[in-house]
């Protein structure tokens, strides 16, 4: 049984009387002990620049077990894997995670594949990429990348940018619920090919759910300046792909083509990219990535070693996480 009306009024009166009592005052007239407020006059110093270097397994052409072994043997502590590993490990991610742990490799990013603006495929794409985010989380990953598929033979329309932005936002929201951050990978042949297209697609996405993976070679090949991209997208930049690109003369009567190559072998000003990253105190993963071996007779391990040497000896980066 609750208190009576009389008991309630007595309690209320006691509280009011207590509130009316004078507040104790110190001898010096202050109500509270003095506080040192000088710390509030000093801005909080930003955390310093730091890259967590890794190597992408795509260079090994699907032989992920060999990629894991050789990437670890080169001293890397981070790796990027693609969704092709799901065919083998989709029902047993714990087995793949044990393998990575044994090699002291952290999953820095998981490549989830393509998205597009076709409304008919929206639900299937959502289901696929959310399942991939769940798999990446089981491996201990914090980032998942997607690329985009450009319409055949034309630039995307304004409506398609908006539609793809909404799709990426929803994938990103659901992935973040699982503890995985979605990053959009600018790519030749995608919605984000040129510098302005990258910005346009990012603007179409909710910044709370979609960040940028800046591939400096794709950005340069798309006509952009990756050094400028660092400052332009500093508020969305979460991760980088580090590689280079060179022009290759075409056969007689054919136009020149481009080829992605190891760092220092192309036309990307990689040292200036590093300088720009240091200027914004970037902290995050940077993955040395090549789609395939650029020169006949070389091996994936040799290409990865060339990249590792350039990163450490020329750029002054560390492999320690």
Image (spheres, rainbow, N blue to C red):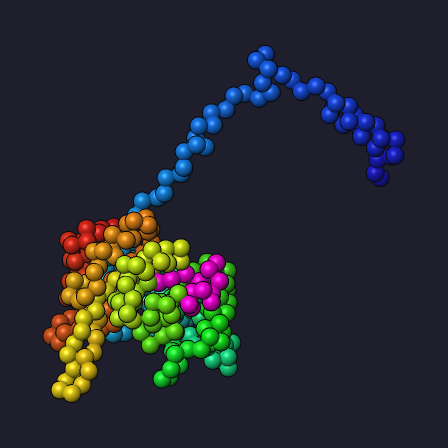
**Residue at horizontal 50%, vertical 64%?**
174
Residue 258 placement, left or right of 93: left
Q: Quadrant of residue 238?
A: bottom left
Q: Which residue sits furthest left?
A: 297
Can you give x and y, in whole percent of width and height, for residue 66 in the image? Answer: 23, 68
Q: Nearer the viewer, residue 145 or 225?
A: 225
Read off the magenta span: 200-213
Quadrant showing the N terminus = top right
Examine the structure image and report whether residue 265 is included in the region drawn in magenta: no
Residue 97 placement, left or right of 289: right
Q: Quadrant of residue 21?
A: top right
**Residue at horizontal 43%, vertical 32%?**
41
Can you give x and y, in whole percent of width and height, for residue 60 in the image? Answer: 23, 71
Would residue 28 be seen by someone viewing this image from the given angle? yes
Can you give x and y, in whole percent of width and height, for residue 248 in the image? Answer: 16, 76
Q: Quadrant of residue 273?
A: bottom left
Q: Nearer the viewer, residue 127 or 244?
A: 244
Q: Nearer the viewer, residue 46 or 71?
A: 46
Would residue 142 be seen by someone viewing this image from the given angle? no
Q: Which residue sits furthest top?
A: 27
**Residue at horizontal 24%, vertical 69%?**
290
Image height of 235 relative to 155, above or below: above
Can you give x and y, in whole percent of width and height, for residue 113 in the image? Answer: 38, 73
**Residue at horizontal 88%, vertical 34%?**
5
User: How many numbered circles does the render carry?
Assistant: 0
Q: Nearer the viewer, residue 308 or 257?
A: 257
Residue 254 placement, left or right of 100: left
Examine the structure image and report whether residue 209 is included in the region drawn in magenta: yes
Image height of 31 relative to 196, above or below: above
């Amino acid at each position: 049984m609750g208190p009576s009306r009389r008991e309630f009024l007595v309690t209320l009166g006691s509280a009011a009387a207590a509130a009316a009592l004078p507040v104790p005052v110190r001898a010096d007239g202050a109500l509270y002990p003095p506080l040192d407020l000088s710390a509030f006059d000093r801005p909080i110093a930003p955390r310093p620049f730091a890259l967590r270097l890794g190597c992408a397994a795509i260079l090994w052409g699907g032989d992920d077990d060999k990629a894991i072994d050789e990437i670890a043997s080169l001293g890397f502590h981070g790796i990027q894997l693609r969704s092709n590993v799901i065919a083998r490990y989709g029902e047993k991610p714990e087995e793949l995670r044990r393998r990575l742990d044994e090699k002291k490799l952290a999953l820095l990013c998981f490549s989830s594949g393509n998205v597009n603006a076709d409304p008919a495929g929206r639900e299937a794409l959502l289901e696929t990429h959310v399942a991939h985010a769940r798999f990446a989380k089981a491996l201990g990953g914090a980032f998942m990348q997607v690329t985009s598929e450009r319409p055949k033979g034309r630039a995307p329309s304004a409506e398609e940018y908006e539609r793809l932005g909404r799709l990426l936002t929803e994938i990103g929201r659901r992935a973040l619920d699982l503890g995985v951050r979605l990053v959009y990978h600018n790519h030749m042949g995608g919605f984000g090919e040129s510098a302005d297209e990258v910005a346009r697609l990012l603007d179409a996405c909710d910044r709370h759910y979609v960040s940028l993976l800046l591939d400096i070679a794709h950005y340069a090949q798309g006509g952009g300046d990756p050094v400028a991209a660092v400052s332009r997208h500093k508020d969305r930049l979460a991760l980088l792909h580090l590689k280079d690109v060179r022009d290759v003369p075409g056969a007689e009567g054919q136009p020149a083509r481009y080829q992605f190559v190891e760092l220092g072998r192309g036309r990307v000003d990689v040292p200036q990219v590093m300088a720009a990253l240091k200027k914004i105190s970037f902290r995050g993963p940077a993955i040395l990535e090549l789609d395939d071996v650029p020169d006949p007779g070389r091996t994936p391990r040799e290409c990865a070693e060339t990249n590792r040497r350039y990163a450490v000896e020329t750029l002054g980066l560390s492999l320690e996480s």
